[in-house]
Image (cartoon, rainbow, N blue to C red):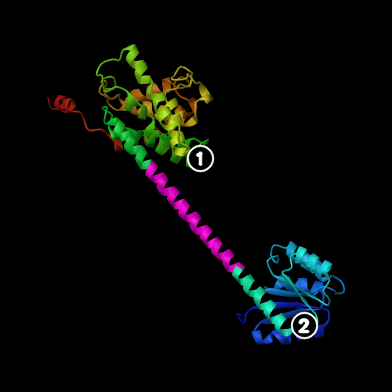
Amino acid sequence: MDYQTHILIVDDVTDNIEVVMNLLKEEGYDFSFATDGEQALSLVQSNPFDLILLDIMMPGLSGFEVCQKLKQDPQTQEIPVIFLTAKVDIDAISRGFELGAVDYITKPFNGEELIARVRNHLELSHAKKLLKQNNLTLKQHLTHRTQRFATELEENQKEMIFLLAELMETTSDETGQHIHRVAEFSHLLAYYDPSMSEEDEDTLFHAAPMHDIGKIKIPIEILNKPGKLTESEFEIVKTHTRLAYEMMSFSDRALMKASAIIALQHHERWDGRGYPNQLKGDAIHPYARIVALADVFDALANRRHYKAAWPLEDVVAYINEQRGKQFEPKLVDLFNAHQDEFAAILEKHRQPPAPHELYEREG
């Protein structure tokens, strides 16, 4: 046993303490001793002990009372206690075990028995500490590995969201830049919205690109029709909200849940005249309210196959005209306060001119 092993001997008879120390000194242990319970408790509070040899019958606090106090204290409850008793009293021994003692040794001491029991309990205690530490290390390792896997899974999920959204947009004239712009516009609004947390900002940035994923199930001839849609065709297009929700609502992951609710509700209007459920005001999820404004702003400010890009001042005018109608008033106010940042995102992702626009300029 390591020579630094520290044993506390507690007995009101100093001769008994000397006997124990003489028997154990060849083992290389360090010793402290106390002649009453109060002194023992004081020593334990200021010194780390690996084992306590504790007499039962002492003036003042008995060994039972000392043991009880030791086991009630989280700082000392793991120290193994061996009772020293002058006689084999079944009731006393039973009570000692109930209080948390690990063993008992009778007086007068048998040297070999004392050495063997002390050594065994020290080795057992050391093994328990080592096992506890290994379990803690293993638990930390598993926790870190689980966190790493979860992070990798989330990052893969985010990449898949953008890939799916870009795949959907290959079926229309909306380039992949549209989903990146909507993601950035949504993140910008969430950043300035005091009701949104950093987690909300991140969720919106990665969930917003899925707002129109349901269009992948809309017939291409309707989706890319150059002229105005008929009423029946528009009703088919409107189903993309429910189709997307049905595709994603099965997932228990927060990002997919957010994507599903955004896809379902981003065409709802603040005044209750939107679709598919005619939700009104606060009944619309905050994420969907933000993406609704971001999506319309981008759709108007950039060209589509059925329209040219609007001048920025006209887009701003429309957004403000729809304050309290299509859009939540608070979000319109945030948009107005940070128009320059929205314009910067537009410029960063500016579309190249269409071939007919180049021809018109050259002509």
> Which residue in the protein does label 1 denote?
197
Question: What count of labels does the image hold?
Answer: 2
| Residue 203 visible, this angle | yes
* Extreme residue in the left direction: 363
Residue 36 versus residue 350 in the image, above or below = below
Q: Quadrant of the N terminus?
A: bottom right
Residue 239 versus residue 164 in the image, above or below = above
> Which residue in the protein does label 2 denote?
109
Q: Amino acid at mark 1?
A: Ser
Residue 48 in picture, x, y percent from top left: 67, 73
User: In this view of the protein, which residue sits in the foreground, 162 or 319?
Assistant: 162
Residue 2 in picture, x, y percent from top left: 60, 80
* Extreme residue in the top direction: 231
User: Residue at position x 34%, y 12% from top?
Assistant: 231
User: Residue at position x 45%, y 31% from top?
Assistant: 249
Q: Amino acid at mark 2?
A: Phe
User: Residue at position x 73%, y 84% from top?
Assistant: 111
- In the figure, residue 7 lies in which quadrant? bottom right
Measure the alpha-carbon separation of dots 2 and 1.
69 Å
Q: Which residues are magenta?
A: 128-157
Q: Quadrant of the C terminus?
A: top left
Residue 284 in picture, x, y percent from top left: 50, 25
Magenta stretch encompasses residue 245: no
